[in-house]
Image (cartoon, grey):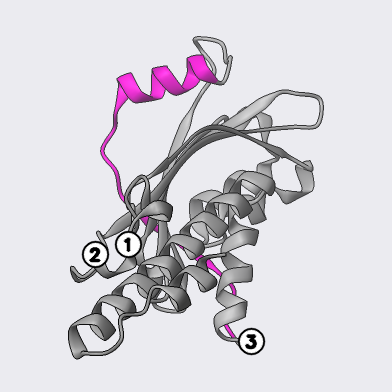
């Protein structure tokens, strides 16, 4: 449908019309990529698996997604809020892990993970503290399920009502912000016990202009 709209809306000629057409097609591509990524995240339990698939599509020989840990200050109010959302007891330990998820040297997302170490195995806790293995990879043996709390687009390549607008009007250069999408979710075991709260912010590098 979008392709037909573009084809029939071409101006008879002129560099200005061609530039506007190119900007419109670029916006359509970015919109499609963003919506596809959002749908993939909503339909999969592991965000790491979604990013790995994206990485592999761009480069069949791409390395495994790694999680570079970033130091964060203690935040007791945030930890207590995470504990409440996870349904943990007041005296149950909660840990925070902030990482940059990278495909090679490209940072695709940044994630804050609050998790309950007492609901993981000893080896999982060691791996989360001392390796660059992504959270979803480490806890995969739990057979976890992802429950999305919110999904928010931080970038709108096309404004509301774009499908009824004249493409020639989309003649401003596309400016992509550093972050384009954010998800809040928690992970739970198959019996319904949550053990991790996630805030994932996806960078502009998930898009290909």
Camera-side residue: 63 or 129?
63
State if disc 1 and disc 2 touch (CB < 8 Å).
yes
How many other residues sit within 10 Å of disc 3, few (<14), some (14-19) or many (≥20)?
few
Label 1 sits on residue: 166
| Picture quadrant of residue 31 | bottom left
Image quadrant in which the C terminus is located: bottom left
Distance of mark 3 from mark 2, alpha carbons? Answer: 38 Å
Residue in the picture at 77% in, 41% down: 142
Image quadrant in which the N terminus is located: bottom right
Residue 158 in the image, given as x and y percentages of width and height = 34, 56
Residue 12 in the image, given as x and y percentages of width and height = 30, 86
Distance of mark 3 from mark 1, alpha carbons? Answer: 38 Å
Label 3 sits on residue: 60
In the image, the segment drawn in magenta is 62-85
Q: Is residue 185 above or below residue 139?
A: above
Q: Secondary structure at mark 3?
A: loop
Residue in the picture at 59% in, 58% down: 48
Q: Earlier in the sequence, mark 3 or mark 2?
A: 3
Q: Is residue 80 above or below residue 49?
A: above
């Amino acid at each position: 449908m979008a392709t037909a709209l573009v084809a029939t809306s071409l101006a008879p000629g002129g560099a200005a019309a061609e530039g506007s057409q190119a900007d419109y097609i670029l916006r359509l591509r970015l919109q499609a990529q963003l919506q596809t990524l959002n749908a993939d995240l909503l339909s999969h339990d592991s965000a790491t698996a979604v990013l790995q698939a994206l990485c592999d599509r761009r480069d069949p020989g791409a390395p495994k997604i790694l999680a570079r840990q970033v130091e964060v200050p203690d935040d007791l109010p945030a930890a207590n809020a995470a504990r409440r959302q996870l349904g943990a007891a007041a005296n149950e330990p909660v840990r925070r892990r902030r990482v940059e998820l990278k495909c090679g040297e490209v940072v695709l997302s940044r994630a804050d993970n609050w998790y309950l170490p007492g609901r993981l195995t000893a080896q999982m806790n060691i791996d989360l503290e001392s390796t660059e293995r992504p959270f979803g990879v480490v806890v995969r043996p739990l057979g976890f399920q992802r429950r999305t709390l919110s999904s928010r687009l931080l970038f709108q390549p096309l404004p509301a009502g774009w499908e009824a607008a004249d493409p020639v009007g989309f003649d401003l250069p596309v400016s992509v912000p550093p972050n384009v999408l954010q998800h809040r979710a928690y992970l739970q075991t198959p019996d319904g016990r949550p053990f991790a709260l996630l805030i994932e912010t996806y960078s502009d590098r998930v898009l290909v202009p």
